[in-house]
Image (spheres, rainbow, N blue to C red):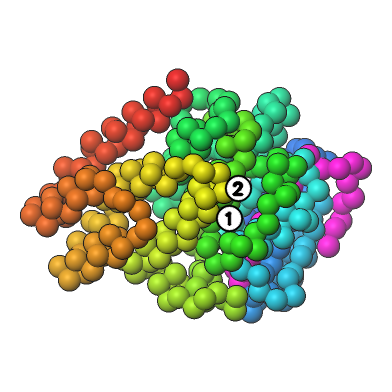
Amino acid sequence: MNNRQLSRKPFLSICITSYNRVNELYRCLKSVDTVNKDLIEIIVSEDCSPKKDEIAQIVNRFVSEKDYYVLYNTNVYNLGYDRNLGKLIELARGEYILFISDDDAFCERALDKIIDTLREIDCAVAFSPFIINSTGEFDRKFKKTMLIPQGIENVKKYLYCSILFSGLIFKKNRIIGYSADKFKNLIYFQVYLFASVLYRDSGCYIDVPLVQCINDGENAFGLSDSSEKNSLLGDRKSIYSNLEYHKGLIKIIEIFDNENETDLINSFAREYSLRAYAGMSKACKAGKREFVNYLNKMNSLNIKLSLISKMYYWALKIMGYKVCDFIFQIPRKILLGFRKRHITR
């Protein structure tokens, strides 16, 4: 599917997961914007979806329109998210691998800035801010570009930065030895990679908004052929859906702790408790029964929640979500903002 041949090994492999999202993938591909065409390759790994023929056609269309080196792969059978990510790592030839979902897009002129920084700073893993398209707000945002020393303390500080895999960058020789096979259906292989790499090697935060998190594509988690069928994973509108995703995330962290004899799960539990308000507020809006069910499901997660989640519960129960949304939004933003500024010093 290539109309360009690279004169040398690519510096950066842009790796796109693809499943059943035709127009979204085309939008993602069209957002690739760089003058360094000889330094990049674009790899699309389509995971044997019902629309695989349409996806192949849309990739061919992009290749006919743009002068990039593009490698297209379609899996013989559905691997699932984690193992498809592993397939992209296997196919990539670049020194660095940049992941992006097919229903996200790159910010204009950001890729060249990222490439310039990566060529100046040697790091094993890197990440940048992203823009939440629905609100225009920035997430994963810190004060300035900075190197992040290796070690468990920085894994604890920055773990949440790896939950959205779009925009995560890894040096290929640091992750090629990790197999995705044991993470089937956990949906957070990138979190394991991020923690494992930063635990042993240095990372970097690059203060360039790189990705627009649009997240408007059809969701295959829990529904695809390789999935253990789970309607809550497939229905992102359900108030309980996020808790089902978090089960896989917690298992990933447990695997990391067991392998490295660390206590990442405890710091994660504290951060999780701090961030629990949004889901609890949505459950409260859905009604008393749903609110109680949500709390029971959250308490059944295999982590020790801190007192702050209990404070959220009683505040919502007594005052209701309208009052609590107003009360909590300001101190939570101030606290999270302070913590982000503090860890950049």
Q: Amino acid at mark 2?
A: Leu
**Residue 114 visible within the image:** no
Q: Is residue 338 left or right of residue 128?
A: left
Residue 176 drawn at (x, y percent): 73, 49
Q: Give whichever of 298, 18 is nearer the camera.
A: 298
Q: Residues within 10 Å of mark 2 (few under 14, many from 20)?
A: many
Magenta-colored span: 1-26
Residue 272 drawn at (x, y percent): 35, 48
Residue 168 drawn at (x, y percent): 59, 44
Q: What residue sits 48% from the left and 51% below the top?
A: 253
Determine whether the residue tagged by mark 2 lies in a helix, strand or loop. Answer: helix
Q: Residues within 10 Å of mark 1 (few under 14, many from 20)?
A: many
The residue at which mark 2 appears reads as 193
Q: Is residue 186 magenta?
A: no
Q: Quadrant of residue 299?
A: bottom left
Q: Is residue 310 left or right of residue 217?
A: left
Q: Which quadrant does the C terminus fall into?
A: top left
Q: What residue sits 82% from the left and 43% below the top?
A: 10
Q: What residue sits 78% from the left and 56% below the top?
A: 91
Separation (CA) of disc 1 from disc 2 = 6 Å
Q: Amino acid at mark 1?
A: Phe
Q: Give whichever of 102, 155 is nearer the camera.
A: 155
CB atoms of marks 1 and 2 within 8 Å: yes
The residue at which mark 1 appears reads as 189
